[in-house]
Amino acid sequence: MATIHDIAKKSGVSVGTISNYLNSPDLLADATRERIQSAIDELGYYPKAAARALKSRASKRVGIIPDSPSDVHSEGDPGDAAFQEYLSAVNLVAARRDFGLLLQASIDGQGELDIYRKLVGEGQVDGMLLLGTTPDDDRVKFLLEKGFPFVTFGRTAVPGHKIWVDVDGNFGMQLAVDHLFSLGHRRIAWIPTPTDLFCHQDRLTGFQQALQKHGLEDISLYNVPGGFREVHGQVAMHLLLDLPLPPTAVITANDYAAFGAMNAIAQRGLLVGKDVSVIGFDDIRMSAHWTPSLTTVKQSMRQVGVTSMELLIDMIQNRPMTSHLIEPTLVVRRSTGPAAG
């Protein structure tokens, strides 16, 4: 790899002049700058990021810790399409604005806050993107206390937390219930999100409001454990089908949970969309190709990722910014149909 000494030799100037070019190019004559840049291009020289960071006190990197047990859709599923779409969008914006990404895994979730302390304390990143927020989120409290730039996917109840990107889960649940009610369903169940997440209460409120709007009872008999993984949907659906008066339709925490619910329905010899209707949440690409294709509340993870990263870089660069509540849409496919009977 080329060094600063190689550039100095190639361009016929001193090492000190090369240093000036890298840090204060306006101090040099146009001809000198052109000669140095030509040598840099020819030799393929890149200044070391660590050295630049020491001088500028900026890393030009953003940190993401994706594997917390609380993170949205991030419970170890290798095919987590929603997070992959989010990460792809974040990376696109980072590249466009000359930033890098640092992904740091949390093994058990218990030491996650220690990773934040390390990344912030050592100056490894200039800002953090957070996923899967809880109402009383310790990560948010820590970053606010440090005055460190961060943007969350999801809201919290932490005082002073003002910059976030979220999908309106309340509205999304109302869209789902409205659609099922229009098809004649009156026994509608919800396989919920993990109860520690902020989005849980948001969606629960929307679910309850929609039932009340249509004169339906919030039947406590349908309370089942939930989650984002396929197995969570499958177990919960079996519990619902074991009831004396099972639901004719179910809304799930995400598309993976919907796939699990659909498998459970098939295992009972029932037909999805005919005997029991199912609605997911996300609209990952697989949803359109599942059998039958999945009706789902579409939250654009690409839009979430792009907006989050743009906001964070604006925050790092002291530009104006505001939080964003994204409105979801309902994508109707074959997993929902008229209520049986």
Image (tube, grey):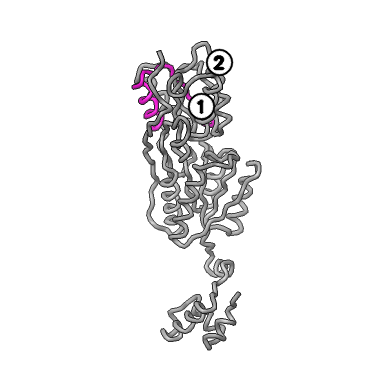
Query: Of marks 2 and 1, which one's residue comes earlier in the chain?
Result: 2
Quadrant where the C terminus sits is: top left
**What whole-number distance in Å separates the C-alpha atoms at marks 2 and 1?**
15 Å
Quarter of the figure with the N terminus: bottom right
Number of marks: 2
Residue that badge 2 annotates: 242
Q: Determine the residue positioned at 36% across, 16% down.
A: 215
Looking at the rendering, the stretch of residues picked out in magenta corresponds to 171-195
Query: How far across and how far down the image is residue 24, in percent?
Result: 47, 77
Which residue is nearer to you in this view: 317 or 330? 330
Mark 1: give few (<14), some (14-19) or many (20+) Cα within 10 Å: many
Q: Secondary structure at mark 1?
A: helix
Q: Residue at x 51, y 42 (%)?
A: 81
Q: Is residue 87 above or below residue 232?
A: below
According to the picture, the residue beneath numbered tag 1 turns out to be 262
Q: Secondary structure at mark 2?
A: loop
| Category of crowding for the residue at label 2, using alpha-carbon neighbours closer than 10 angstroms: few (below 14), some (14–19), many (at least 20) | few
Kind of residue indicated by mark 1? Met
Q: Nearer the viewer, mark 2 or mark 1?
A: 1
Q: Give the residue displayed 47% in from the left and 81% down from the top.
A: 38
Amino acid carrying label 2: it is: Asp
Q: Is residue 113 magenta?
A: no
